[in-house]
């Protein structure tokens, strides 16, 4: 066995590299149509009960699947939208209310965030970016732990639904789970809806 191959942190790093490549290829092939398909899938799943619900999304960067069509549809259905704000390196994310057309400011890591004057709000549904996922709902993120800390904090305070989003190609057989890793309740890709132990496909 090569040196470091049995180290779980090295294994995660290698998997991140592999999945970044998969995501980039998927994005190059069908970014625009994937964002629209994801939005339709989200509304098909949640649209009937979204009035007054707070849906926290994110502003996509690089080759993350584009959730802006989803945010637009959510906003048109009397739901309340929010975007995440980083408050500290070891702190959970804060979600601030945001409407399409509201100003965004540049933050760390190339992230765009709502203005500090936008009111904080607790989400009912959190749309979570990812590098990879498995069928059990385990997520591979970027390594900063922001969403794990955030979901742990939100779940301790009450019911919240964590929905990972990405391209179909970002699925992997198994993601190693460590203390503090928070599972997803559901994964939506542009082609499938995955609830733990169950897959719904419409292509």
Image (spheres, rainbow, N blue to C red):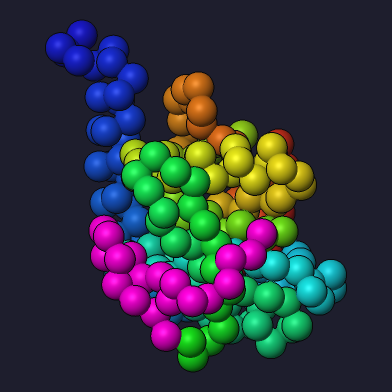
x%, y% of residue 124? 72, 59
Q: Which residues are magenta?
A: 103-122
Q: Residue furthest top?
A: 1
Magenta stretch encompasses residue 76 = no
Name the foreground residue: 10 vs 19.
Answer: 10
Question: Measured along the vertical axis of the image, is residue 136 above or below residue 108?
Answer: above
x%, y% of residue 144? 35, 41
Name the foreground residue: 161 vs 108.
Answer: 108
Name the foreground residue: 105 vs 40.
Answer: 105
Identify the residue at image location x=34%, y=76%: 105
Q: Quadrant of residue 30?
A: bottom left
x%, y% of residue 97? 58, 73
Q: Quadrant of residue 27?
A: bottom left
x%, y% of residue 41? 66, 69
Identify the residue at image location x=42%, y=85%: 103
Q: Residue furthest front?
A: 117
Describe residue 151's horizontal placement relative to residue 45 as left or right: left
- Asked whether residue 173 is in view, the answer is yes
Question: Measured along the vertical axis of the image, is residue 93 above or below residue 135?
Answer: below
Identify the residue at image location x=44%, y=72%: 116
Question: Measured along the vertical axis of the image, is residue 169 above or below residue 8?
Answer: below
């Amino acid at each position: 066995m090569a040196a470091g191959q049995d180290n779980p942190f090295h294994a995660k790093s290698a998997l991140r590299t592999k999945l970044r490549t998969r995501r980039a290829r998927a994005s190059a092939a069908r970014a625009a149509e994937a964002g629209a398909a994801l939005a339709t899938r989200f509304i098909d799943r949640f649209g009937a009960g979204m009035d007054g619900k707070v849906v926290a999304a994110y502003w996509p960067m690089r080759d993350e699947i584009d959730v802006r069509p989803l945010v637009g549809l959510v906003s048109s259905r009397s739901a309340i939208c929010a975007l995440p704000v980083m408050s500290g390196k070891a702190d959970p994310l804060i979600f601030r209310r945001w409407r399409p057309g509201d100003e965004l400011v540049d933050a760390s890591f190339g992230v765009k965030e709502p203005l500090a004057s936008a009111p904080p709000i607790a989400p009912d549904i959190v749309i979570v970016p990812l590098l990879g996922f498995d069928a059990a709902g385990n997520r591979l993120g970027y390594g900063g732990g922001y969403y794990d800390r955030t979901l742990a904090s939100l779940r301790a305070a009450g019911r919240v639904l964590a929905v990972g989003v990405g391209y179909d190609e970002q699925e992997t057989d198994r993601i190693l789970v460590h203390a503090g890793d928070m599972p997803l309740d559901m994964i939506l890709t542009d082609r499938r809806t995955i609830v733990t132990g169950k897959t719904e496909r419409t292509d």
